[in-house]
Amino acid sequence: ERSRGPPLVARLVGSSVDAAGLRERVASIVDGTNPTTGIEGEASWDESRSIKANLEACLGFDLPSPETTEKADYVSECGICYAHRLPPADDVASGGGGSEDEDGAIPDAMCGNPSCARSYHETCLFEWLHSLPDARVSFDRVFGTCPYCSESLSVRVLSISRGK
């Protein structure tokens, strides 16, 4: 029988800014300190609960589950640049790492093939389609194929492409 005790090792993936607080909470659980009260030796992990219920109680939020989320919620990075959020346009031009309050573009174009359904930033998709030798331009759209499944797709022509 597997133990329902606190995890001895837990790996949280994400930026150090976003995951730092969660890493501290998990470390305190492993050390035996209640992450909510900060009192050492006070139980925050109840072995009668499921591991998921314990993690939710200790971390302070509900974990995603198939009943509460869709596949698209998990696959939100761009299929071309593999980033979720692009740097703001003026930040790309300057080559800097702008402030965290600024919002860059998130993937807003998607492959129409239901078995693929990859998400792309409009600028990344424009550059991808524009680089294909068999891409077509008609009025304000560039037409080409998905990099993963070769399904036909298009994006509006962008006057300013992302600097690299």
Image: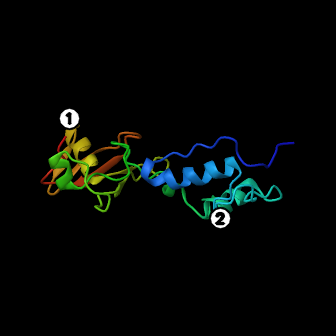
Task: Say if mark 2 contacts mark 1, CB within 8 Å.
Answer: no
* Residue 108 visible here: yes
Closer-to-camera residue (16/80): 16
Closer-to-camera residue (130/14): 14
Q: Is label 1 in a helix, a strand or a loop?
A: loop
Q: Is residue 18 left or right of residue 85?
A: right
Q: Which residue is mark 1?
A: 133
Residue 81 percent across, percent down from the top left = 33, 42
Is residue 109 positioned above or below 128 on the image?
Answer: below
* Amino acid on which disc 2 is placed: Thr
* Residue drawn at point x = 41 percent, y = 49 percent: 77
Task: Tell me the quadrant of the picture where the C terminus can be found.
Answer: top left
Q: Which residue is mark 2?
A: 37
Is residue 8 positioned above or below 111 on the image?
Answer: above
Residue 81 is labelled as: none
Is residue 135 positioned above or below 85 on the image?
Answer: above
Q: Residue furthest right?
A: 1
Q: Is residue 130 left or right of residue 108?
A: left
Q: Is label 2 in a helix, a strand or a loop?
A: loop
